[in-house]
Image (spheres, rainbow, N blue to C red):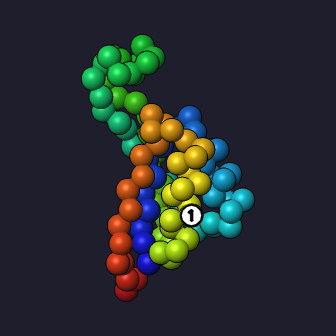
Amino acid sequence: MKLIEVYIDEQYKDNLVDLLLEDGFDDFYYFSCHKYAATSMLLSEKEQVSGRKDYGVFRLFVQEDISILLIQKLQKIFNKDQMRIVSYSSLSEI
């Protein structure tokens, strides 16, 4: 089993939820978070004042073979400015 964390710009959250549900993923978690960056990297005035961008992280527990296909699909849909993926291997549920 693998844990996949998908960090995504909050404006794309609903798109990712729809995609996951359409692909049969109905057991995942979402947490609000912030991405901190230099003000030159932030677009809106609100972001530049606070130094952060609204983000979210999705956590999915999936089988090894499914994780590869899911990651490839997400990388085709979202670019690196919109999303970051972290994968943890060899997990076992207790």
Which of the 4 quarters of the picture holds residue 4? bottom left
Q: Amino acid at mark 1?
A: Leu
The residue at the point 54 percent across, 56 percent down is 72
Please tell me whether residue 78 is drawn above or below residue 43 in the rendered image: below
Please tell me whether residue 48 is drawn above or below residue 11 in the rendered image: above
- Residue 88 image point, x, y percent: 35, 67
Label 1 sits on a secondary structure element that is: helix
- Residue 41 image point, x, y percent: 35, 22
At label 1, counting other C-alpha atoms closer than 10 Å, the crowd grade (few under 14, some 14-19, many 20 or more) is few
Kindly tell me whether residue 31 is visible in this rendering.
no
The residue at the point 52 percent across, 74 percent down is 65
Work out which quarter of the rendered image holds the C terminus and state it.
bottom left
- Residue 21 image point, x, y percent: 68, 60
Which of the 4 quarters of the picture holds residue 53? top left
The residue at the point 37 percent across, 83 percent down is 92
The residue at the point 27 percent across, 23 percent down is 38
Total residue callouts: 1
Q: Nearer the viewer, residue 57 or 74?
A: 74
Please tell me whether residue 82 is drawn above or below residue 50 in the rendered image: below
Q: Looking at this view, name the residue that lies furthest to the bottom.
A: 94
Kindly tell me whether residue 23 is visible in this rendering.
yes
Q: Looking at this view, name the residue that lies furthest to the top.
A: 45
Give the left or right position of residue 14, taking residue 4 as reference.
Answer: right
Q: Which residue is mark 1?
A: 69
Q: Looking at this view, name the residue that lies furthest to the left.
A: 38
- Residue 32 image point, x, y percent: 44, 45
Work out which quarter of the rendered image holds the N terminus and state it.
bottom left
